[in-house]
Image (cartoon, helix red, strand yellow):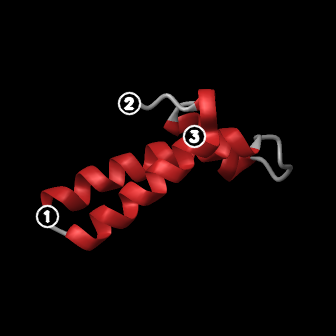
Amino acid sequence: MTTAEGARAYETDTTPSASAEDVAAYVATMARDLNKLVSRHDLATLSYLLELIQLEATRTAGSKSDLPD
């Protein structure tokens, strides 16, 4: 699931059609992208927290995560 697909599924669907793994993969992608932003602005604590979120979301997503190792 791409970021855009995840956002559309979340915003337009009132029924829970996405699996927990799909949601976790979306969160992992968003955390990675947000981490890039905060890292450029030397926000170390936010970067650390986003890394933790990304790790947990990637673990939860399992094989559905499209993030590189």
From the image, state whether disc 2 or disc 3 is nearer to you: 2
What's the residue at 31%, 64% (across, down)?
48
* Residue 8 visible in rendering: no
User: Tags 1 and 3 in contact by the CB under 8 Å rule?
Assistant: no
Q: Closer to the N terminus: mark 2 or mark 3?
A: 3
Q: CA distance from mark 1 to mark 3?
A: 25 Å
- In this rendering, the answer to whether 40 lies above or below 5 is below
* Residue 20 visible in rendering: yes
- In this rendering, the answer to whether 10 lies above or below 48 is above
Q: Quadrant of residue 46?
A: bottom left
**Residue linked to disc 3:** 25
Q: Is residue 63 left or right of residue 51?
A: right
Element on which disc 2 rests: loop
Element on which disc 1 rests: loop
Instruction: Please rate how many residues cluster around mark 1, counting C-alpha atoms within 10 Å: few if below 14, some from 14 to 19, many from 20.
Output: few
Location of residue 15 in the rendering, given as x and y in whole percent from the top left corner: 86, 49
**What's under tag 1, amino acid-wise?**
His
What's the residue at 50%, 38% (across, down)?
3
What's the residue at 62%, 39% (across, down)?
61
**Residue linked to disc 2:** 69
Disc ID at residue 41: 1
Instruction: Please rate how many residues cluster around mark 2, counting C-alpha atoms within 10 Å: few if below 14, some from 14 to 19, many from 20.
Output: few
Disc ID at residue 7: none
Q: Closer to the N terminus: mark 1 or mark 3?
A: 3
**What's under tag 2, amino acid-wise?**
Asp
From the image, state whether disc 1 or disc 2 is nearer to you: 2
Q: CA distance from mark 1 to mark 2?
A: 24 Å
